[in-house]
Image: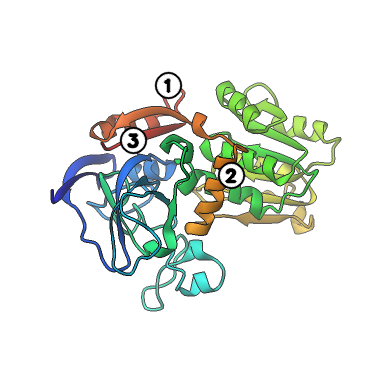
């Protein structure tokens, strides 16, 4: 077999399933047969034309699969082995990697260094919504799946879990901190779980969907607030005795949630931003304390690489977090267009969709 099915970007508003050649395997690559992948909010930005990629590019960046073929330089893995690879697949040889920021791997002096350079699947190279994906720099990026774990249990590791946890890690949550997480979509739910693992004593989850708030409670939230029913800024300040929270994690990418996250911070607190913003952000003078509040604003792009994936897999294997509940729907790859329609319109209580090529 020399051809495979793949979901490709055609034009804004159109992602279609087409036949493409199975890519040849270079010395540093691995060809992985996809057993499960999923659709991310970033893929919806691509579908809508809000984030530009090349026409004909295979979309998707969250692979779970089986090694079909290994490049001659790739050591320590075997064909037939179950693996994942991070959505961010750095080379670990770039300036960014050598400087300790592998998520920004990519670019060069002649073409410019760009943020998100380490995000290659479905961005600069063919991605994972296909029967096969070529993993570059496989030695640095493949992570074996522990025995006994299902595809659904590890499906969040390549992107959503890594991103949500990064929001908690970058904020340097300390034991006993009070943390609020704005938005309980898949990334926000993982941020809630990450805050719990980091030792937060009180976690406040904010969303407008009661079902998501129920899941947030299972992920570790102590207090859940529906913004349709309460003024969340007033309530958070009341809950903290007017002190404000130590950490606010913004996981949606809207001006309103970013601003509310600022307004509930204590002096010296940290706003950890995970949202992907599509318009300019405005920082209100009062919420920012005119720049005198000793606040920190930090952003994160999901860490990648095999050691990051190994650590996330070990957390799942330990039973300390169960993200299988985030997979609410399943579609065959043949029905990828219908899956996009469901996910992009957030119908039927969807959180994440498992896409099965075979």
- What residue is rendered at 40% in x and 27% in y? 329
Give the total of numbered labels.
Answer: 3
**Residue nearest the viewer, comparing 145 with 127:** 145
Mark 3 and mark 1: Cα distance apart in space: 17 Å
- Any mark on residue 355, and which? 3
Q: Secondary structure at mark 3?
A: strand
- What residue is rendered at 56% in x and 34% in y? 322
**Residue 99 coordinates in the image, percent (x, y):** 55, 73
**Residue 270 coordinates in the image, percent (x, y):** 72, 51
Image side of residue 234 versus residue 84, left or right: right
Give the mark nearer the N terminus: 1 vs 2. Answer: 2
Pointer 3: residues within 10 angstroms few (<14), some, or many (20+)?
A: many
Give the mark nearer the N terminus: 3 vs 1. Answer: 1
Outermost residue toward the right in this view: 241
Image side of residue 300 versus residue 334, left or right: right
Mark 1 and mark 2: Cα distance apart in space: 29 Å
Q: Secondary structure at mark 2?
A: helix
Visible residue check, residue 217? yes
Give the mark nearer the N terminus: 2 vs 3. Answer: 2
- Any mark on residue 266, and which? none
Q: Which residue is mark 2?
A: 315
**Residue nearest the viewer, comparing 178 with 233:** 178
Pointer 2: residues within 10 angstroms few (<14), some, or many (20+)?
A: some
For the residues carrying marks 1 and 2, which lies nearer the camera in this image? 2
**Residue nearest the viewer, comparing 289 with 215:** 215
Q: Which residue is mark 1?
A: 348
Q: Secondary structure at mark 1?
A: loop
* Quadrant in the rendering for residue 5: top left
Name above or below for residue 242 compared with residue 227: below
Looking at the rendered image, the quarter that the C terminus falls into is top left
């Amino acid at each position: 077999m020399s051809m495979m099915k793949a979901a490709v970007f055609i034009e804004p508003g159109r992602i279609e399933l087409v036949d493409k050649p199975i890519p040849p395997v270079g010395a540093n690559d691995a060809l992985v047969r996809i057993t499960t992948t999923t659709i991310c909010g970033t893929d919806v930005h691509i579908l809508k034309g809000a984030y530009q990629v090349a026409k004909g590019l295979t979309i998707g960046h969250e692979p779970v699969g089986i090694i079909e073929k290994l490049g001659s330089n790739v050591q320590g893995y075997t064909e037939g082995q179950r693996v994942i690879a991070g959505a961010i697949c750095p080379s670990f040889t770039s300036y960014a990697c050598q400087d300790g920021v592998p998520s920004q791997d990519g670019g060069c002096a002649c073409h410019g260094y760009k943020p998100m350079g380490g995000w290659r699947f479905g961005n600069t190279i063919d991605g994972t919504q296909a029967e096969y994906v070529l993993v570059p720099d496989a030695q640095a990026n493949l992570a074996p799946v522990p025995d006994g774990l299902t595809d659904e249990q590890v499906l969040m590791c390549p992107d959503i879990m890594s991103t949500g946890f990064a929001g908690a890690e970058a904020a340097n949550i300390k034991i006993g901190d009070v943390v609020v997480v704005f938005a309980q979509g898949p990334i926000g739910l993982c941020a809630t779980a990450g805050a719990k693992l980091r030792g937060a004593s009180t976690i406040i989850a904010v969303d407008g969907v009661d079902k998501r708030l129920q899941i947030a409670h299972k992920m570790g939230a102590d207090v859940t607030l529906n913004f349709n029913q309460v003024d969340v800024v007033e309530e958070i300040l009341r809950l903290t005795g007017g002190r404000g929270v130590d950490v606010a994690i913004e996981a949606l990418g809207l001006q309103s949630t970013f601003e509310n996250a600022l307004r509930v911070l204590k002096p010296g607190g940290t706003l950890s931003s995970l949202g992907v913003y599509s318009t300019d952000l405005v920082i209100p003078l009062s919420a920012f304390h005119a720049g005198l509040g000793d606040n920190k604003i930090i952003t994160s792009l999901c860490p990648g690489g095999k050691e990051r994936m190994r650590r996330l897999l070990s957390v799942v294997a330990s039973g300390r977090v169960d993200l299988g509940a985030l997979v609410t729907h399943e579609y065959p790859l043949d029905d990828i267009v219908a899956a996009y329609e469901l996910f992009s319109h957030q119908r039927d209580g969807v959180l994440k969709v498992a896409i099965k090529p075979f």
